[in-house]
Image (cartoon, grey):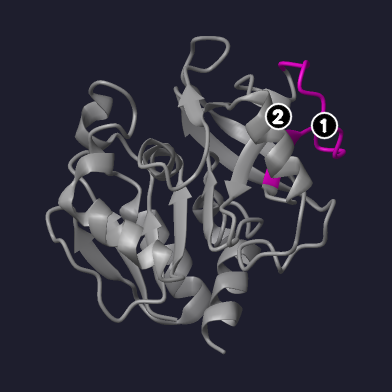
Amino acid sequence: MKAGIVVFPGTNRERDMVHALTSASGQAPQMLWHQQDTIEGLDLVVLPGGFSYGDYLRSGAMAAHSPIMKAVRSFAEKGGYVLGVCNGFQILTEAQLLPGALLRNAGMRFLSQDCHLKVETNDSAFTRNWAKGDVFRTPMAHGDGNYTASSETIKQLEDEDRIAFRYCSSAGDVDPNNPSVNLNGSAQAIAGILSKNRRVCGLMPHPENLTDPLTGGTDGLPLFKGLMETLSV
């Protein structure tokens, strides 16, 4: 699996993503600078977390217009795999590679804590190493993670089995109206979604931060193992 990680001014989770990808595949990813306008020889492009351009205007808005995003769009249109985590998810929605938008958290506070996610589909490279209904723990760290979309878009995501993850309790209960479960107020407790071709995935929490026992567990490792298995065939 040949992966690349895009680095924007303000990105701060790229090294966490390097560790996760290297742990899963045994191969270190390339670092891609935001001003380059080509992507060659890669199977996977990752947009990691952080505060690209200081979240000026809106989170991810300026990064969506960086030169490299034209290359990311072309890469995705040709069937390449793209993963956006936290700020990366925000960038993917701003670039319209995924539908919807990420608004200010419902409580108007930055959230930095563990949460639990329920796997809503295992029909993707990103979720194949879980069973549908599995629950795992993962950190979250964002101020603008409140996923929103039109009712038509959410219905389409549900009908096409494109909701990858939802926020839930440790027991797996999903309750969009319960702020102790749906911590940022996301519509239908949506934490992550897939593109129509299921090769682009965005999610707000940080599975890359739980891929090593030394950092508290390996709950997030199945995501990266699934990508490795898919892209190493």
Residue drawn at x 19%, y 46% as measured from the top left? 66
Secondary structure character of the magenta stretch overall:
loop
Mark closer to the chain start, 1 or 2: 1
Image quadrant in which you'd find residue 82: bottom left
Q: Is 166 in the magenta?
A: yes
**For the view shown, which residue lies furthest in the top direction?**
108
The N terminus lies in quadrant: bottom left
**For the view shown, which residue lies furthest in the front direction?**
152
Image x and y of residue 63, in percent: 25, 40
Q: Amino acid at mark 1?
A: Val
Considering the numbered disc 2 on the image, is that residue within a helix, a strand or a loop? Answer: helix
Q: Give the residue at mark 1.
A: 174
Image x and y of residue 219, in percent: 66, 56
Residue drawn at x 73%, y 50% as measured from the top left? 160
Up-down: is 214 above or below 103? below
Q: Residues within 10 Å of mark 2 (few under 14, many from 20)?
A: many
- Viewed as shown, does residue 213 lie left or right of 78? right
Image x and y of residue 161, in percent: 75, 51
Highlighted range, magenta: 164-179
Up-down: is 31 above or below 176? below
Front one among 22 and 126: 126
Image quadrant in which you'd find residue 41: bottom left
Front one among 29 and 43: 43
Front one among 75 and 152: 152
Residue drawn at x 41%, y 63% as measured from the top left? 76
Image x and y of residue 113, in percent: 57, 30
Q: Give the residue at mark 2.
A: 189
Q: Is 68 in the magenta?
A: no
The C terminus lies in quadrant: bottom right
Q: Amino acid at mark 2?
A: Ala
Residue drawn at x 57%, y 40% as measured from the top left? 139
Q: Residues within 10 Å of mark 1 (few under 14, many from 20)?
A: some
